[in-house]
Image (spheres, rainbow, N blue to C red):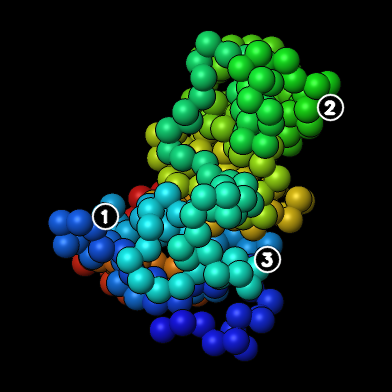
Amino acid sequence: MALSPTTAQSSALLEIADLEKVYANGTYALKGISVSVEPGEFLVVIGLSGSGKSTFLRCINRLHEPTSGQILFQGRDVTHLSGEHLRAYRQEIGMVFQHFNLIKRRSVLENVIAGRLGRLPVWQSLTGKFPQELRNEALEKLEIVGLAEKATARADALSGGQQQRVAIARTLMQRPKILLADEPVASLDPATSHSVMKYLERINKEHGTTVICNLHFLSLVRQYASRVIALKGGTLVFEGSPQEIDRAWFAQIYGEEAVEVN
């Protein structure tokens, strides 16, 4: 069902109505998901592996084409954009992945600048001759994630947590209105996970960037999320505050045999 004109004029930054994604093999990854995201929220998506979390994020930034439903961004229908319109929309939506995807032999600063390459002339991308203004902005983004002193280091000389923070700084170079984070701490140890999450929280609270983040551990969810949605088998089964997820809700989302790990 399409969003009504009244809904389309609401204060929400992002609105999703009856979103479905069916893969070519007939698998339903998402089944009628409807959710609104307000500016400045830190929305966390939880659920078992295979519940549809990653597909949900990839439909938002249109790495996956929705099968049906509607996605509105700032009141604009972006469900089936293509070409220049899709590229312009993606510049508004930053994405941080589980794997850092850095250029290992390049410096940290060059990796961060790469977040702006989609808006730069091709010759600058090829030669690496970037204006000082751009370098200064990249240093500012590194400052936000606490890594300005590592600007000249090679990316592969950094720890896993530091590399993820570089990936976040690279995404910030897009100046996104929404930052999507797909299991950003899944490959990190618990202490490092908190370090990365604290910088995402800082970006959200101090810089006003809306964050939508997929997470596994409820201990992280309860500490950082302003609101939570849970997916199970591609269906939305919970929407509320982190504090509402008691033992009964945990069992419904993850199964009776599941045990919460801190």
Above or below, 158 against 261 in this view is above
Residue at 65% x, 13% y: name it.
Answer: 127
Determine which of the numbered discs, if any, sits on residue 194 in the image: none
- Specify the amino acid type for callout 3: Pro
Please tell me whether mark 1 sits on a helix, a strand or a loop. Answer: loop
Residue matched to label 1: 50
Q: Quadrant of the N terminus?
A: bottom left
Please tell me whether mark 2 sits on a helix, a strand or a loop. Answer: helix
Residue at 50% x, 59% y: name it.
Answer: 81
Residue 99 screen position, x and y as percent: 43, 33
Residue 176 screen position, x and y as percent: 66, 49
Marks 1 and 2, Cα distance to the nearest angstrom?
43 Å
Residue at 16% x, 62% y: name it.
Answer: 26
The answer to whether residue 69 is left or right of residue 21 is: right
Please tell me whether mark 3 sits on a helix, a strand or a loop. Answer: loop
- Specify the amino acid type for callout 2: Glu
Determine which of the numbered discs, if any, sits on residue 133 in the image: 2
- Specify the amino acid type for callout 1: Gly
The front one of 227 and 64 is 64
